[in-house]
Image (spheres, rainbow, N blue to C red):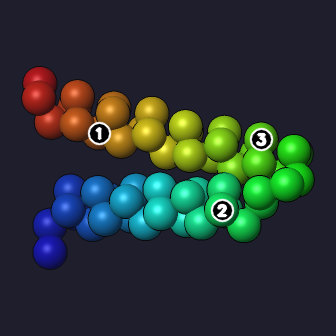
């Protein structure tokens, strides 16, 4: 497996994890806030990953 594929798989798993944290934190404002920030950060890194590949 290429390094680039492993990195992508890692970010996909982080994103799934963030989604699980969001579901688990329903009803707790600060946990939900942290989970959403984590998800947004994962998506930003994924966007950078795909933008880098386009160069």
Query: Label 3's element?
Result: helix
Can residue 14 be seen by looking at this rendering?
A: no
Give the Cα separation between the discs numbered 1 and 3.
24 Å
Relative image position of residue 19 (x, y in whole percent): 55, 58
Name the residue beneath numbered marker 2: 23
Name the residue beneath numbered marker 1: 49
Q: Left or right of 5: which side holds 36?
A: right
Residue located 31% across and 65% down the image: 9
Residue located 65% across and 43% down the image: 36
Q: Find residue 33 and name its label.
A: 3
- Label 1 crowding class (10 Å Cα cut-off): few <14, some 14-19, many 20+? some
Q: Quadrant of residue 51?
A: top left
Choose the circle earlier in sequence order: 3 or 2: 2
Choose the circle earlier in sequence order: 1 or 3: 3
- Label 2 crowding class (10 Å Cα cut-off): few <14, some 14-19, many 20+? few
Query: Label 2's element?
Result: helix
Choose the circle earlier in sequence order: 2 or 1: 2
Seen from the viewer's position, the closer of residues 1 and 33 is 33
Give the Cα separation between the discs numbered 2 and 1.
26 Å
Residue located 37% across and 59% down the image: 12
Q: Left or right of 25: which side holds 2?
A: left
Query: Label 1's element?
Result: helix
Q: Quarter of the image for the C terminus: give it.
A: top left
């Amino acid at each position: 497996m290429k390094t680039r594929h492993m990195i992508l798989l890692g970010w996909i798993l982080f994103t799934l994890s963030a989604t699980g944290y969001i579901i688990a934190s329903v009803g707790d404002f600060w946990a939900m806030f942290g989970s959403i920030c984590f998800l947004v950060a994962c998506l930003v890194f994924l966007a950078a990953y795909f933008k880098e590949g386009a160069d």
